[in-house]
Image (spheres, rainbow, N blue to C red):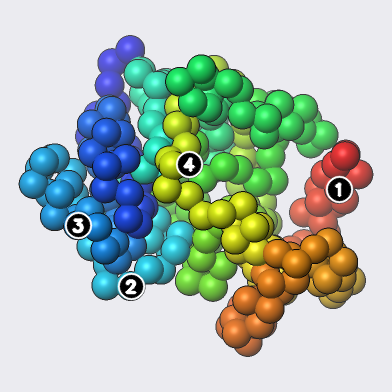
Amino acid sequence: MTPPRTTDVTVVVMSRDRRDDLLATLPRHEAPVVLVDNASSDGTADAVEAQLPGVTVVPLQENVGSYARTIGVECAGTEFVAFADDDSWWAPGDLARAVGIMRAHPRLAVLNARILVGPEERLDPVCAEMAASPLGTPPDLPGPALLGFVACAVLVRTAAFSAVGGFDRIVRFPGEEERLALDLAAAGWGMAYVDEVTVHHHPSPRRAAPEQRRAAIWRSRVLTALMRRSVPQVAGVVLAALRTGAPERRGLLHALPDVPAALRVRRPVPAGVQEQLRLLAGSAP
């Protein structure tokens, strides 16, 4: 398949302290790349600039989490942006294929690709969940409708992403996708799982400990609920954090400093999105 034109799409990658991963994965991308470096201490920015001069490097002085992707989108200036992590990349030809699918479906804001994990190319279990979405497949979308996505494996429509503010400074990372997905749905945009395009994900060995990651995810969950969920739903998320385990309770505590900022931008999603949330909750195991 013909590679996408440079005016069509940019690959935006955010990273922190994963220099070696980046030097291996960035050359795999079949479009211009913007790397936003979240204040790495391992010489990432200098190494990428020296060894991969075609990559646009945006070095930040502080770690802003997923907001780095929003900075990258602003730098890209293309109609579409593909997000990849420092340990993921689009399969050959599939970025161009995804751009074509986006053009054919003007309501589609986020295309979530199939994710194959590791050298053995195992299907990520989340893909089976997305393929079986209880939201069905509307006639104007190319696959099952979603109310969330996996940020390392999506193509987004820049106009839609920017109109709802992109990723924010409050939620940061991980678990940053939920608030953005809710805002896109509230604005009438569609998100879909498309199995015919593939992203490879070879998880980096440089990862946070599982309990640390669980705490961070629950921090994001609490703050997103405060920003976009109803009061009973917020109470439910808080109670779940208190009852589930120590990492979840730490996540709740870590959310507290950002509660005032979350409340300042509180805007509960409309009834139609609430109904979609109820459908998804009813289908959860």
Asked if the residue at tag 4 contacts the one at tag 3, i.e. Cβ–Cβ closer than 8 Å, the answer is: no
Q: What residue type is labelled 4?
A: Cys
Give how far across and how far down residue 172 sits, in percent: 51, 65
Give how far across and how far down residue 90 sits, in percent: 40, 28
Could you say whether the residue bearing mark 3 is in a helix, strand or loop?
Answer: loop
Q: Mark 1 points at which residue?
A: 281
Quarter of the image with the N terminus in it: top left
Q: Earlier in the sequence, mark 3 or mark 2?
A: 3
Q: Which residue does the image show at 61% across and 52% down from the upper left?
A: 210
Q: Which amino acid does label 3 sit on?
A: Gly
Q: Name the residue under label 4.
A: 152
Could you say whether the residue bearing mark 2 is in a helix, strand or loop?
Answer: loop
Q: Which amino acid does label 2 sit on?
A: Glu
Q: Which residue does the image show at 51% across and 45% down from the upper left?
A: 151
Q: Earlier in the sequence, mark 1 or mark 3?
A: 3
Give how far across and how far down residue 273 sits, in percent: 77, 54
Q: Which residue lies furthest to the top in this view?
A: 1
Q: Earlier in the sequence, mark 1 or mark 4?
A: 4
Q: Name the residue under label 2.
A: 62
Please indicate whether residue 162 sits to the left or right of residue 211 in the image.
Answer: left
Q: Distance between the residues labelled 2 and 4?
A: 21 Å
Asked if the residue at tag 4 contacts the one at tag 2, i.e. Cβ–Cβ closer than 8 Å, the answer is: no
Up-down relation of residue 73 to residue 24 (above or below): below
Give how far across and how far down residue 75 sits, in percent: 26, 56
